Image (cartoon, grey):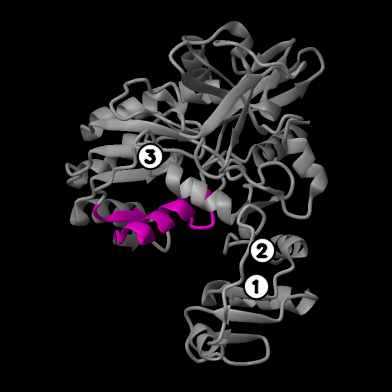
Amino acid sequence: MNPAYTTYEFENLFKIVEAKIVFCSEMNLETLLQVKSKSNTIKKLVVIDQQDINNNDAISLEIFLKSSNSNFKVKEINTKEQIAFIMFSSGTTGLPKAVALTHHNVNATLIAIEHPAVGIPQDMGITLGVLPFFHIYGFYQQIQALKKSIPMIVMEHFNPFDYLQCIEKYKLATLIGVPPLINFLAKSPIIDDYDLSSLKDITCGSAPIGEDVLLLVKNRLKLDTVRNAYGSTEAHMVIATTPLGSTINKSVGKIATATTLCIRDIETGKNLPANQHGEICTKSEMMMKGYYKNETATKESFTEDGFLKSGDIGYYDEDGYIYVVDRLKEFIKYKGFQVAPAELEAVLMKNEKIADVGVVGKPDQAAGEIPIAFVVKAEGVDLSEDEVKKYLEQFLSKHKYLHAVYFVDVIPRTPSGKIIRRELKGLLKKLTECKL
């Protein structure tokens, strides 16, 4: 679980998983003590970074280990049924769901990400642990480091200066990141103060990113390759990756090993041929068993023939490259046209005056919805609403034009980099009400 969750968020998740023992750190101990006081299932908190705690509610890890049963025997299990991990989907719509992953799923994923087609370098040297470990991407980075005996430099919090200093000091050759990190490397002026010449390969995952930003960071840092990775917690890590040596950065890559992919028509459910847009659906030994204690959500997530629905709209081309257009539920319906926020965001991020951007639809009586943008200006620049609108209009057709631009200090994102559009829509509602 995300250690930064509030009492309310923890309470909702513990109602699902009904944990008996919770491992935590001193940082969130007070929050979890409040949760425990209201829980019928939590018996003990084990604090991993405090040595002198031992009471009815919480004990140190050292005391816990000493009091554990040394005669523990491993049970025989059905690896395809026994749950190994429960992780939580990012919760960009509604409450997070508990994703149940079996031992078989974990083994299949560990085999798949070792495959040359995935392209994870076998001689990574030191790796940088900046991605959240409760997220599937950072979770498997952690497991890979343990499995391969690779030293990992763990950052407690992201600090741009510490981040760059780590790359320089430990001469890192490979980075994995999410869009905010890649945007930072592509555009921040402080990059030039550090020697990042050791970097050869960067992979971006977890959320959409424009081709132009990838090319910008590739050229700026003189990288051999920049690559995309596409996956989800439900699909259990990886669906597609850009092949090593490929220069096609608009795509999220080619399908991962041991995975079957099809594009399903949203209305009819029929399989579509190349270059036709539909929902991306996959099947593999990696995909989740289902949502823990949520049969309804599990049933809705799979097709009748057992394919996992991604909720993403996309297509593949004649060469097998996969393209993600947008989230199924995030399309803006403007006068019958489907406008993909990710497309507008990718274009706007080409503008060097824009540090970050989020696009949402605003209800409109005449059009249904109209596209509006929240923009974070790059440091020390002047930028007007009209300038942003005209910049976009150079690239896209009229039904994709922006009807309003709001300047903000930050775009709300999940720890994995996905834009939290419900927060932007909430802000839009407040701004609209203020004007009225």
Mark 3 — residue? 115
**Residue at image coords 51%, 85%:** 65
- The answer to which image quadrant residue 380 occupies is top left
- Residue 161 as seen in the image, left or right of residue 241: left
Camera sees residue 244: yes
Q: Nearer the viewer, residue 168 or 366?
A: 168
The residue wearing badge 2 is 6
Q: Are marks 2 and 1 in contact (CB under 8 Å)?
A: yes
Viewer-proximal residue among 376 and 2: 2
Q: Of tags 2 and 3, which is closer to the observer?
A: 3
Q: Earlier in the sequence, mark 3 or mark 1?
A: 1
- Residue appearing at x 21%, y 41% in the figure: 192
Expressed as whole percent of the image width and height from the top left, the position of residue 274 reads 55, 11
Against 201, residue 382 (above or below) is: above
Residue that label 1 marks = 31
Lower position in the chain sequence, tag 2 or tag 1: 2
Quadrant where the image shows the N terminus: bottom right
Q: Amino acid at mark 3?
A: His
Disc 2 marks a residue whose amino acid type is Thr
Give the magenta part as a residue range: 125-150
Residue ID at (37%, 38%): 203
The amino acid marked with disc number 1 is Thr
Circle 2 Cα neighbour tier, 10 Å, few/some/many (<14 / 14–19 / ≥20): few
**x, y (%) of residue 267?**
77, 17
Tally the marks.
3
